[in-house]
Amino acid sequence: MNQRIVAVPAAVREQAHIDDAKYRAWYEASIRDPDAFWGEHGRRIDWFKPYTQVKNATFGPGEVSIRWFEDGVTNVAHNCIDRHLATRGDQVAIIWEGDDPADSRRITYRELHAEVCRMANVLRNRGVSKGDRVTIYLPMIPEAAFAMLACARLGAIHSVVFGGFSPDSLAGRIQGCDSKLVITADEGLRGGRKVPLKANVDAAIQRLPADSVDHVIVVRRTGGAVEMDPVRDVYYDAAAREVTDECPAEHVEAEHPLFLLYTSGSTGQPKGVVHTTGGYLVYASMTHQYVFDYHEGDVYWCTADVGWVTGHSYIVYGPLANGATTLMFEGIPTYPSISRFWEVVDKHKVTIFYTAPTAIRSLMGAGEEPVKKTSRSTLRVLGSVGEPINPEAWEWYYRVVGDERCPIVDTWWQTETGGILITPLPGATALKPGSATRPFFGVKPVVVDGDNKVLEGACEGNLCIDESWPGQMRTVWGDHERFVQTYFSTFPGRYFSGDGCRRDDDGYYWITGRVDDVINVSGHRMGTAEVESSLVAHPKVSEAAVVGYPHSLKGQGIYAYVTLMQGEEPSEALRKELVAWVRKDIGPIASPDLIQFAPGLPKTRSGKIMRRILRKIAEDDFSALGDTSTLADPGVVDDLIENRQNRA
Ligand code: ATP
Ligand code: MG
């Protein structure tokens, strides 16, 4: 196990909101008396009518019901925009960096107010009001944030669908929540390539009953020619000219739904995760402030897509509620050059940078030079989210990107949790590469064995959370029973994350991956993340995905998909070398039985490896791969099938 400890740099600690002593004191208070703790911190946002009740939640067994600040009345758009106008109307709220480096835009809070009000009026003119669902299918352009905030302003519930999703996935998500209005763009632009968003919307609507969608609003992004239905469709610029830039913010109850977001589906049928207003905003803004140690004047950049929960909580809602300057990037890390991320950091003087391990690993493949030729001297805090970050990638991120100056916050959370649950705090937490470290305030992780017995001290098992936190999802849209079944029935009375973890002697958490991904080799259970981490530590390997497959002697065998660093060639010798490498690193039990060299792995647009597809191919059963339309590049699947190693 990696035992390296990176102490909190004195310079970071001195100016941080939270040091170790404060972390411990606040954490203890938050667990001892959640009502008092959250009662105080809930006031970080504005309330039209203050709450008198704080927490009201039960995880069962039996009824599961989660409410926070329930008699309070507020509005998210008011909190993210209006309340800042008096003090920071001329401060930049959103820096937009286009796909083409020549394209960028700076939007002040005052301009944001006008844009959001206009968009809200356009929606209101088309019959949208409190409680209605609006589907947003936009690229990473400022209008995506305007649209989300416009819905929030009206009390309408948005459902953002990734711009990369196919017409089928989009149709299912429109129908799933019965939304009558879709906001899209003519085309998206990523890495110089056009994405036919409006055409996808047309194709999606064709699959739905005739009266499903009444209005499609089309933002002009590329100006490309698209078909417009004269009754149903309208260009946003035309509609916006007909309305004013003033629109009052609807007063909504704390538990009024703010948005629903379908899970990425990397583990099964997508669920409409429902997040509500008050608790969500309190939690998103508070985690944004403390996890990234956000201060006035910071330029904060989260590279996620707004179609992912990370984009909701940490591009839009958390940062804007804090009056921050948040950067929104339309493009990809490798266009027009592999230095793009770092060029953008220098161009906009980014101080806080938050990305995913998959991005780091793919950039590592091109070596240090494309990073080192940029300055990055403004960076102060780095973040990681989405998957376990293997120590190899962590070290590269720390040393090459951060020049050993910037703490890395490895943030563990889920669509369902609304915000970050387990994470270091830059000024408080000594880091261990590969560990998400300690729980955020108010979060009570427990590790249980298969019989729901709570394990104490250093241990390994299933990661559950006892006790609600304000940002928690409230239900599955239209199917509360599925909510209860999915999250509260495996270990009755607790929220089960679906992830496994290890807790070490210092109380630090190490996420070992999804419990479903645990493989059982000759009676030994092991997390696939551990084997992957070992493979990726090999200097020639850039990415690895490990799954189990039926093995006549061992029960399950280990099947590894390996992507090599640029310039490395697959060979029989390398295959043997990798097997020996893992054997030496973890032990003979973990040696891969089969290794497939793969130029690419199937990923969702949020960068998650679609393991269910890899499992099928490893089982030599690729007739039923399920829905592959949500993949970033469905083409990689054919190559994987053709070169599969197990021909049963
Ligand atoms: P679906 O639920 O549809 O199958 P998903 O779980 O990939 O998709 P998300 O909610 O975006 O969708 O991802 C949450 C999961 O990502 C966590 O349950 C965990 O497995 C993984 N994860 C996120 N952050 C981290 C992290 N810092 N360390 C380890 N794992 C992480
Ligand atoms: Mg999940």
Image (cartoon, helix red, strand yellow):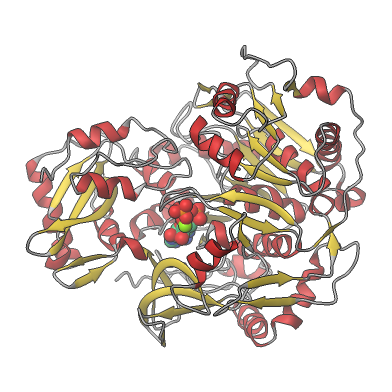
Q: Seen in the image, is 215 located left or right of residue 489? A: right
Q: Where in the figure is residue 334, as x and y percent of width and height?
A: 45, 32
Q: Is residue 477 above or below residue 527?
A: above
* Residue at image location 61% in from the left, 14% down from the top: 224
Q: Seen in the image, is 258 located left or right of residue 369? A: right
Q: Is residue 82 above or below residue 253?
A: above
Q: Is residue 87 above or below residue 292?
A: above
Q: Where in the figure is residue 119, as x and y percent of width and height?
A: 80, 34
| Residue 522, quarter of the rendered image | bottom left
The answer to whether one can see residue 1 in this image is yes
Quarter that holds the N terminus: bottom left
Residue placed farthest to the top in the image?
225
Observer-nearest of 245 and 365: 245
The answer to whether one can see residue 540 in this image is no
Observer-nearest of 87 and 447: 447
Q: Where in the figure is residue 2, as x and y percent of width and height?
A: 32, 69
Observer-nearest of 273 and 454: 273
| Residue 527, quarter of the rendered image | bottom left
* Residue at image location 30% in from the left, 37% down from the top: 600
* Residue at image location 37% in from the left, 82% down from the top: 451
Observer-nearest of 533 and 612: 612
